[in-house]
Image: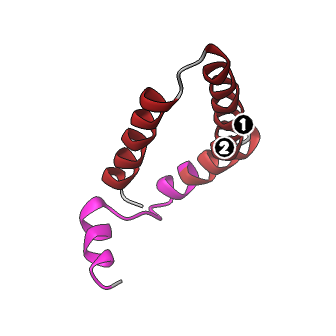
Amino acid sequence: MTTAELDSRKMILVREIINHFNTEESLQKLAEACSIIRGQEEEYHSIPQPLFQQLMDKAEEQYKAGQYLTDEELLEDMKSW
């Protein structure tokens, strides 16, 4: 899904909330659901700090050893994908 499609779906949900969630109780339930979902997304997208540090250390070693591509090289390589 593209960013534009994602933004469009978000706006549809916002309109749905504005037009159909009219009680304090329904808004409270919606807020709780949003909190749960946000927590799940944060868990899904987070990387454990030790793994992150390990990957960064490896990347730094590769860079020092000259095992990397420049932006131009990467773009040229991607043309063949």
Which portion, as a residue range, is magenta? 60-80
Residues 54 and 66: in front is 54
- Asked whether residue 79 is drawn in magenta, I would say yes
Q: Residue at x 74, y 41 (%)?
A: 48
Placement of 39 over or under 80, stated as above or below: above
Q: Which quadrant, please, contains the N terminus?
A: bottom left
Placement of 22 over or under 50, stated as above or below: above
Mark 2, Cα crowd under 10 Å, few <14 / some 14-19 / many 20+, is: few
Q: Residue furthest top?
A: 24
Give percent across and percent down for residue 36: 72, 33
Mark 1 lies on residue:
49
Mark 2 lies on residue:
52
- Element type at marker 2? helix
Placement of 66 over or under 81, stated as above or below: above
Give percent across and percent down for residue 33: 68, 32
Give percent across and percent down for residue 27: 60, 21
Q: Residue at x 63, y 46 (%)?
A: 57
What separation in Å lies between label 2 and label 1 (alpha carbons)?
Answer: 5 Å
Q: Residue at x 67, y 37 (%)?
A: 37
CB of mark 2 within 8 Å of CB of mark 1?
A: yes
Main SS, magenta residues: helix
Give percent across and percent down for residue 66: 44, 61
- Mark 2 residue type: Phe
Residues 43 and 33: in front is 33
